[in-house]
Image: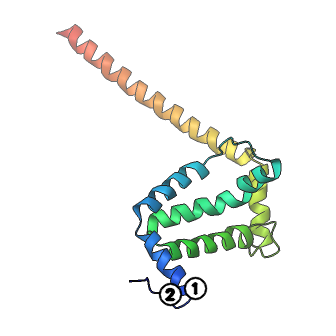
Amino acid sequence: MPKREPDNIFSYLNNQVHVLNNSKIFAGLMIIILNISSRFVNIKLSKSMESYLKHTFSKQILVFAIAWMGTREIYVALFITLIFTICFEYLFNENSAFCCLPESFKEYHIELLENADVTDEEIAKAKEVLEKAKKKNKDTDLKEYTISNAENYKNYLS
């Protein structure tokens, strides 16, 4: 008996996606892809291909693999990958024309990264905390010394 022809290309594609969703082999392949694309593998490629895999293609594959492993649904993983790409490549990327972050936010965080110096106020607070700790330590040492001497005096009198 011949196989029934699919109604159209989309129902055929949908059926194939459902087969992949339930495939343990596909799950294993996704885990392998996740492990390979999560770090740079030294493969002899042309400079342009290496750059493409390193900076563009591998990010989306990695996000897809992580999303698929979490959901086990290809369509959901594709949607998550799409949303991730839109958010982090366009909406939250300060170099994008579609960036939605306010200028003050971008400037503040760029300044934080560039100026990791300690301020005078932070130095003063740190000194104050150290002085308190030193004083507390001296007070504790004095109490221990007094108690120790009192016990020695008792023993001496006995």
What percent of the width, then of the height, locates residue 154?
22, 15
The residue carrying mark 1 is 9
Direction from residue 71 to residue 63 in the image, left or right: right
Residue at 71 percent across and 48 percent down: it is 121
Q: Secondary structure at mark 1?
A: helix
Bin the neighbour count of mark 2 within 10 Å (Cα to Cα): few under 14, some 14-19, many 20 and up. Answer: few
Q: Residues within 10 Å of mark 1 (few under 14, many from 20)?
A: few
Res 38 visible: no
Residue 109 vs 127, above or below: the answer is below
Residue at image coords 49%, 75%: 16
- CB of mark 1 within 8 Å of CB of mark 2? yes
Residue 136 in percent (x, y) is at 47, 34
Q: Secondary structure at mark 2?
A: loop
Q: Nearer the viewer, residue 111 or 2?
A: 2
Between residue 109 and residue 123, name the one nearer to us. 109
**What amino acid is at disc 2?**
Pro
Q: Quadrant of the C terminus?
A: top left
**Residue identifier under label 2:** 6
Is 144 left or right of 54, judged from the image as shown?
Answer: left
Disc number placed over residue 79 in the picture, else none? none
Q: Residue at x 57, y 41 (%)?
A: 129
Image coords of residue 34 (percent x, y): 54, 54
Q: Nearer the viewer, residue 59 or 22?
A: 22
* Residue at the outermost left position: 158
The residue furthest front is: 1
Color theme of the render: rainbow
Quadrant housing residue 108: bottom right
| Circle 1: residue type | Ile
User: In the rendered view, does 128 fall on the left or right side of 119?
Assistant: left
Quarter occupied by residue 90: bottom right
